[in-house]
Image (spheres, helix red, strand yellow):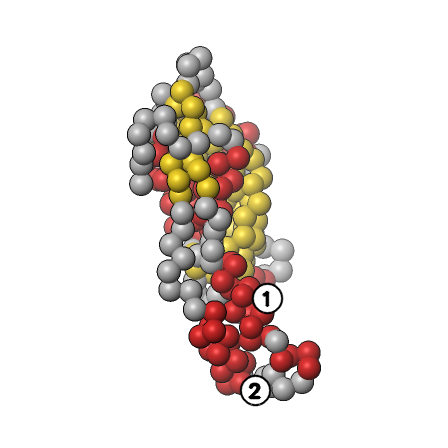
Amino acid sequence: MSGPAGAALRVVPDADGIDLAAAESAAAGFLQALGISTAREGMRGTPGRMARAYAELFSPRPFDLTTFPNDEGYDELVLARSIPLRSVCEHHLLPFVGTAHVGYLPGGRILGLSKLARVVEYFACRPQVQERLTKQIADWLQQQLDPKGVGVVVEAEHTCMTLRGVQATGSSTVTSTLLGTLRDDARSRAEFLALTGLTGALG
């Protein structure tokens, strides 16, 4: 997935295979199997709403990964903090929500700032585990930008932990992936973690 040097990379999710009618029928069977009737007025449309809701959760918006020449030779950290994140746990298909902090040390090109949030959304809109999500964002930015370093920290609350099972209300999970200089250089790593506000959580 790359275009000519200087051209925006069009990132288009694969929408093949979405069958809302089949999903609605399956949702109705799922509810019935759990002893939940869809006969009353308030529940009649629920299978369809379930199908459309999950289709939306699993469908990131297309975007252009717009980059620009780093003509000024900017070599300090670029960081987007507290990017809203929502995904779905692949083990229970329950949501997890939180924030992502995404930063990089530019090489030859810099990225349009809004695209950091788009990349987070792109990888979050599928059944996920937080550890994989964090690494996918970092690895993809490293591949597409070839920066000197990339750092991604994700902090999220998992409803599969807070609403069921252990019911650990208020708990959050923090994961990180650091690549290049942000991994290898202690000073750069400390700066990144300090700017995310999570220095204590990640040591």
Residue at the image position 60 percent from the left and 75 percent from the top = 46
Task: Give 86 or 12, whichever is nearer the viewer.
Answer: 12
Image quadrant where one finds the N terminus? top left
Residue at the image position 40 percent from the left and 43 percent from the top = 11
x then y, percent, for residue 41: 68, 82
Work out whether residue 98 can be spotted: yes
Residue at the image position 52 percent from the left and 80 percent from the top = 28
Work out whether residue 138 can be spotted: no
Amino acid type at mark 1: Leu
Q: Secondary structure at mark 2?
A: loop
Mark 1 Cα-neighbour bin, 10 Å: few <14, some 14–19, many ≥20? few
x then y, percent, for residue 121: 49, 47
Please tell me how many numbered marks the rendered image carries. Answer: 2
Is 63 placed above or below 71 here? below
Is 51 placed above or below 67 here? below
x then y, percent, for residue 24: 50, 75
Is 123 placed above or below 141 here? below
The disc at residue 163 is 1
x then y, percent, for residue 65: 42, 36
The disc at residue 187 is none
Foreground mark, 2 or 1? Answer: 2
State how far apart marks 2 and 1 are (Cα). Answer: 20 Å
Look at mark 2 in the image and give the residue it sits on. Answer: 35
Amino acid type at mark 2: Gly
Q: Secondary structure at mark 1?
A: loop
Instruction: Of the two numbered discs 2 and 1 on the same chain, state the one appearing first in sequence.
Output: 2
Residue at the image position 48 percent from the left and 79 percent from the top = 25
